[in-house]
Amino acid sequence: MADYKLILPAMGEGVMEATVINWLKNVGDTIEEDESVVEIATDKVDSDVPSPVAGKLKEILVNVDGIAKIGEPIAILEVEGEVSSAEPVAIPAETSVSEPETSVVAELEKPLKSSGSLDVSSSDKFFSPLVKSIAQQEGISVAELETIQGSGKEGRVTKEDILKFVESKKAGSTQPATQVTAPVSAPAKPQPVIVSGEDEIIEMDRMRKIIAQNMVQAKQIAPHVTSFIEADVTNIVLWRNKHKDEFLKKNGEKITFMPIFIEAIAKAIKDFPMINVSVNGDQIIKKKNINIGMAAALPTGNLIVPVIKNADQYSLAGLAKQVNDLANRARQNKLKPDEIQGGTYTITNIGSFGNTMGTPIIPQPQVAIMAVGAIVKKPAVVETPQGDVIAIRHKMYLSHAYDHRVVDGALGGGFVQRVAQYLEAFDLNTPV
């Protein structure tokens, strides 16, 4: 018999730690190869950790609610024969956006030679060992650390937060690179809520707390503007009604409207590539890939946004498969961490709730999001060779919210108009 250390694997770009929320096995239980052992939660998603080997759970190293580091052991398994423990998983380096960040990451990849770590005992905030080591190497004081607005769980300062702070400090600013540099007033304190004896108090779950924090942060960072346009999607409705059974039989997938909407958005992004960007201080990062996130409602009432990577490279059938698979696994809480990261543009279907228009909030660090409303039959003027006539058409509103720091009305309005044009030009002879 031999001991095998179960290592916490890499959980996606920028994720350095995870919280253990539930052990699925108890000490002494037998574990099959690839069987899930523990449920963990990161800032981005909940996930299971499977065991790469079969054996018996000998010891739990990180208890429930404990913080586990990527690449470190979380449990010890007893296995047959001489099986070496897994090597620590290599954490993929984050995409470099500037020279200062690259140099800092390079230093962090070397063994730490400092004799001690930054003493943060005087602070009420929690700082991870990685954040403290960066602060020490860059000469950042505890007082400066406390001024950094954390984007991690419960406002914790992440590696990305402190690297941006380092970059802005070297550039002569003491604000994080993602913050607006214009003077802003102190945030208003929420008014105290008076609770009567008949009121019910409901504690937010972990995901709702993260959503609340992200939404506030998104509105503080990006000045939102929304443009609206009405699209005639009659051809799309008629084509789907005619071919949905044949599509299912041929492709093994149900065809909804969402893949068609995503296809039109991907085409429009190619026409307007400056909508597919992110903001890093005074820099605009133009994204090479078109990765479209689609907001999905969970049974709990929360929202999650799985991402279709390289959406422009899929056929309509391929997009239907991606949409159905991600939506189903989102509702079952079976998404992988990297499947909700890397989005460059987002679509949300408010029409599924019967809504016609909306003003969605842009997920950071993207600069735009589109809400598609309910498809409604209404009378409309239609041009024919014999003259204008009034006909019953299937109409839908598109609501396009964009970040006015980098997207002006000409771009934001032109983009949503182009999406509408692609939808209205949908060919009734499109092959199944």
Image: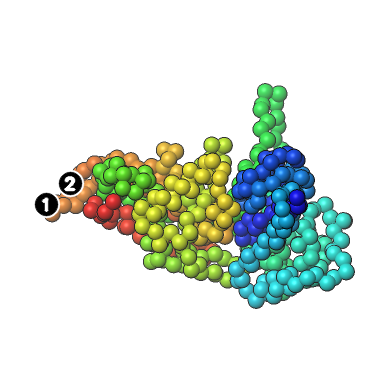
Q: Is residue 182 visible?
A: no
x%, y% of residue 282?
59, 70
- For mark 2, give the secondary structure: strand
What amino acid is labelled 2 in the image? Val
Viewer can see residue 193 = yes
Q: Quadrant of residue 29?
A: top right
Residue 297, percent across and down? 51, 42
Image spot of residue 294 (x, y percent): 48, 50
**What is the residue that sits farthest to the left in this orientation?**
386
Q: Is residue 132 left or right of residue 8?
A: right
Find disc 1 in the rendering and name its residue.
386
Q: Residues within 10 Å of mark 1 (few under 14, many from 20)?
A: few
Quick check: 62 left or right of 11?
A: right
Measured along the vertical axis of the image, is residue 289 above or below residue 255? below
Q: Nearer the viewer, residue 147 or 132?
A: 132
Please state which of residues 97 and 92 is positioned toward the viewer in this rendering.
92
Query: What residue sits 78% from the left and 70% below the top?
Result: 111
Q: Are marks 1 and 2 in contact (CB under 8 Å)?
A: yes
The residues bearing labels 1 and 2 have C-alpha atoms spaced at a distance of 9 Å
The x, y position of residue 69, in whole percent, is: 73, 55
Residue plotted at (21% across, 43% down): 391
Tag of residue 389: 2
Residue neighbourhood size for the residue with mark 2, other residues' Cα within 10 Å, grouped as few (<14), some (14–19), many (≥20) = few
Q: Depth check: give the residue in front, 44 or 57.
A: 57
Q: Residue at x 54, y 37 (%)?
A: 299
Q: Quadrant of residue 141?
A: bottom right
Q: Residue at x 52, y 51 (%)?
A: 306
Identify residue type, mark 1: Gln
